[in-house]
Amino acid sequence: MSGCGDSEEPARQKQIEERPTEQTPQAAPESAAKPAEASHTDAPESGVDYHSFANTDDYRVKHLDLDLTADFENKVLKGEAILDIQRLTQKNPPLILDTRDIDVSAVRAGVGTSLQDVKFSMGKTDPNLGTPLKINLPKGANKVAIEYRTSPGASGVQWLEPQQTAGKKHPFLFTQAQAIHARSFIPLQDTPQVRMTYKATIRTPEALRAVMSANNDPEAELDGVFEFEMPQAIPSYLIAIGIGNLDFKAMGERTGVYAEPELLDAAAKEFEDTEDMLEVTEENFGPYRWDRYDLLILPPSFPFGGMENPRLSFITPTVIAGDKSLVALIAHELAHSWSGNLITNASWRDLWLNEGFTTYLTNRIMQFVYGDERYQMEMALGYDDLQADLADRPDKDEIMAIDLRGRDPDEVFSNIPYEKGSLFLYELEQKVGRENFDKFLMEYFNHFAFQSITTEDFVKYLDETLLKQYPDKLDRARIQEWIFEPGIPEGAPQPTSDAFTKLDPIREKWLNGEMKASDIDTEGWTFHQWKYFLDGMPEKLSEDQLQELDETFDLTQSKNNEIAFSWLMIAVRNDYEPANTRLEDFLTSIGRNKFLRPLYRNLVENGKIDEAKRIFEKAKPGYHPLTVKVNSTIIYGD
């Protein structure tokens, strides 16, 4: 989910603007005690996933064999999932799996290839968690085969009509499994605690190519059948499928890009530094363990900036700016190959272990490849984003190890796990020294490789390493404060950038009428500086000021989506009519919640709810289900 960075603020790619509203779940069935019986008077129990029905203390899925047909006409995936399970008890309780809006037609179970029909039942549906699937197993059974089909409205699958793609000729499908949407297209133990290998056969219309978070063959014949294998064990949220009119172009020995032909060359040029990023990350933090690192450029309806699906990150086309200004997103998704994919949070409470580490690594990668000034700007923008989030959130949601019981886990995505987590690691680096901290990180990635860990596992590892090595520099109580208390501890680092601070007096002089916009020397300004300059404007500007800025810098027609977004936020607040056409086009052509949610909220808060409804209803058929859910809440209060 993720996901997520660039000059385009790594942490900010798949987070803040994607939070659904809190809902009170119905009581879960007795067999799914974790979600239903959680006590909210005490802290969450470490290592317990409150967002899965799966009885993982009894069984663990070790391997998945998937055979699915993509039925574009009916917008369903249909076929069979075969699960190899490890028994953890001498008893023979039912196997409980996670599903959401899946129609199960038959279940077989047994030992090896000798499978027989068995009884199964669907439990009570929970609005956040879906529906548990209970399967009665024959004694000793270690394999379960489930025939099923997905719902056309599956929360983790988007079906796009040809007109919603770049080429306008072929349909497109992509999945998005984080946080708990894998259960909407595969019945399994949908918890990051469980890691599995998988093989898959994906059947498509013959004109289209299928790709997955697995080994992809760009030379595979377009015969309607594609075979995949993921030999490393991964959690369910990293299983991903993409199907469309896709071509491939190599960017380096181990890196390349899949995209529609219309986007392929531009994407390969924009992201040509990916191989360099991969090499410097290996050099500093240990080997890349996933064979290849390729990118899939999705249609603009993708709700996130990027998703770190192993071997094949899913990327929004909104970061193709033509000047590499937003490529920190690629650095962020690549960094997940170490923090998140290699070492995974054991539950969504522990997301900061994925995203805080990844945001920290993203900034370091950007420094390695693009230099100190870029690094300082990335850090400073991240700090500003964190401050904004802290000002807008209740204390309980400012805690890195957040309590998500009774809530949709998608609510975890904010700048807290990303930027607060990164700032915490930055403080550790500052206290023990970069060289020592880099050594710690490399050892950490090796120690926990291919494991899912909790916050408490990490703290225990800190106790045994850095706290023991540097008792005069680190304090256990302060570490506890960072992780388990709201806000930022007093005396924490405050990243700044000279490239930003020199813009403050310029903005002030223009606001005071002491200089004209045309006298501002913007030659060489990066996207970061434009964002800082615009985001620092007061809430209200005069019509003359808006016109002067727009006429001088052509902001309404900016080709950089980040700059356009910052300008449109100003335009909405100030009812600047010349930007209305661009605003509608922006909202109807992009599905990225990082942009959509604040713009819709801005419209509603500024008394333009009818306009927000009109544009939303026009755009809704092209939005991802998550995008519809999140923004419906803002507009209709559902």
Image (cartoon, grey):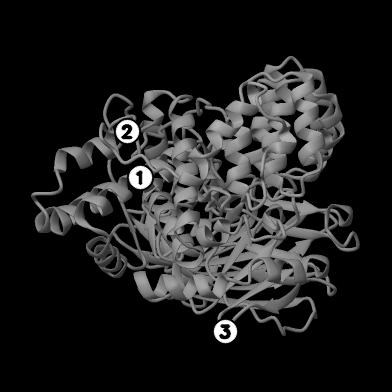
Amino acid type, residue under disc 1 in the picture: Leu
**Residue 314 horizontal side relative to residue 42, left or right:** right
3D distance between C-alphas at marks 1 and 2: 9 Å
- Mark 1, Cα crowd under 10 Å, few <14 / some 14-19 / many 20+, is many
Q: Position of residue 514 (x, y in %)?
A: 65, 25
| Relative horizontal placement of residue 465, taking residue 523 as reference (left or right) | left
Quarter where residue 50 is shown: top left
Q: Does the image show residue 31?
A: no
The residue where tag 2 is placed is 488
CA neighbours of label 3 inside 10 A, class few (<14), some (14 to 19), many (20+): few
Disc 3 and disc 2 in contact, CB within 8 angstroms: no
Element at label 2: loop
Mark 2: give few (<14), some (14-19) or many (20+) Cα within 10 Å: many
Q: Which mark is residue 253?
A: 3
Residue corresponding to mark 1: 423
Q: Earlier in the sequence, mark 3 or mark 2?
A: 3
Disc 2 marks a residue whose amino acid type is Ile
Alpha-carbon distance for marks 1 and 3?
34 Å
Q: Quadrant of the C terminus?
A: top right
Amino acid type, residue under disc 3 in the picture: Glu
Q: CB atoms at circles 1 and 2 under 8 Å apart?
A: yes
Looking at the picture, how far across and down is residue 83, in whole percent? Answer: 50, 66
Q: Nearer the viewer, residue 396 or 195?
A: 396
Give x and y (percent) for residue 391. 45, 25
Q: Residue 406's image quarter?
A: top left
Work out whether mark 1 precedes mark 3 in sequence or the reverse, and give the earlier one: 3
Q: Which of the two marks, 1 or 3, is nearer to us in this view?
A: 1
Q: Compared to 579, does 588 lie above or below? A: below
Tell me the residue at 66%/44% (across/down). Answer: 521
- Left or right position of 299 against 375: right
